[in-house]
Amino acid sequence: MTSARDITLAVNPPRSAFLDFPLGHTAGKPHEPDLQRRILVEALSSFETMAAPGSMKELPFRWSEDEEWKAKAFAEGDDRTPRHDTPQYQNEEDRRRAENGGSPSCPVCRS
Amino acid sequence: MGPVDYIPRIRDNYARLGYKTYNWVVNAETAPWAPLRKPLSQCRLGLAASGGIYVAGQVAFHYKDDTSFREIPSDIDTKELRATHFAYDLSDARTDPNVVFPIDALRRLVREGFLGGLSSRFYTFMGGIYSSRRVSEDLAPRLTARFLEDGVDAVLLVPV
């Protein structure tokens, strides 16, 4: 799956499915399980329908009517986080759990 | 409006910020092809995603050329999933990790019979590794070895 059409066409994988959504939403919108399911069905069907390497399926979904997000994507400078080289936890509780030996529900905590 | 062209936008941004030009991967040869040998309804699917997803209790990813991956049990409680990444807006992934790691939809498709089953473990990594050689010679072979060990019929890749 991809939301960056030009980057994926350059990489040229055997099969791809393009979802024209903002980066960070390659598999759908948050809290919309029915939409997420439909996106997956459309994307996975490519395994059965594509016949030639390098095929890209354009998935039939739009983020919004006006597509205003496209004007903003990467157009206002680099707003990415600095490249820290220490683990970046979502919250301090996660850090505490990991530093205290990890979660018992998780069989492999470092790979 | 057509798709966003990210390569020229990012190239212009890097030039403006004085960063070194990024060498995009361009594969001109025909991609390898492995036909699916049975219907999806009989396939065991694997998943690899680059959105920086980890399980609470695991060591989180870091943001500088992190070539490690995390093993995520495919029956994990979605509430235990976390997201960390330097390159995209995390606000949606942190309230619903399915936007970059479609685990609930995949489990539903197994219940519905659309997919035969899921590998018992999925994999996540960080992406944003500056050297494509480190991905093709280190991270990708390690992931491929896992998928072969896991006996999957097909793998869904979800980059960000």
Image (cartoon, coloured by chain):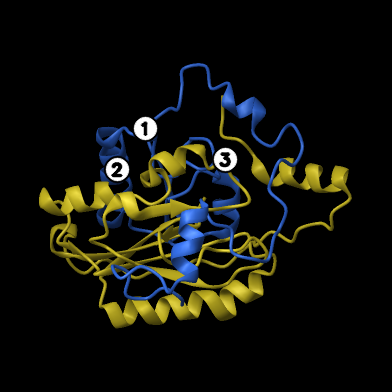
- Residue, x 15% and y 54% (percent of image)? B110
Report the amino acid beneath label 1.
Answer: Pro
Q: Tell me: A52 left or right of A13.
A: left
Q: Which residue is mark 3?
A: B89
Q: Nearer the viewer, mark 3 or mark 1?
A: 3
Q: Which residue is mark 1?
A: A60
Q: Nearer the viewer, residue B40 or B62?
A: B62
Label 1's element? loop
Q: Tell me, what hue is chain A?
A: blue
Q: Nearer the viewer, residue B8 or A12?
A: B8
**Given contact means CB atoms under 8 Å apart, are the residues at marks 1 and 2 in contact?**
yes
Pointer 3 chain: B
Q: Disc 1 versus disc 2: distance between alpha carbons?
A: 8 Å
- Residue, x 84% and y 58% (percent of image)? B20
Pointer 2 chain: A
Q: Which residue is mark 2?
A: A42
User: Could you tell which of marks 1 and 2 lies nearer the N-terminus?
Assistant: 2
For the colour yellow, the matching chain is B
Label 3's element? loop
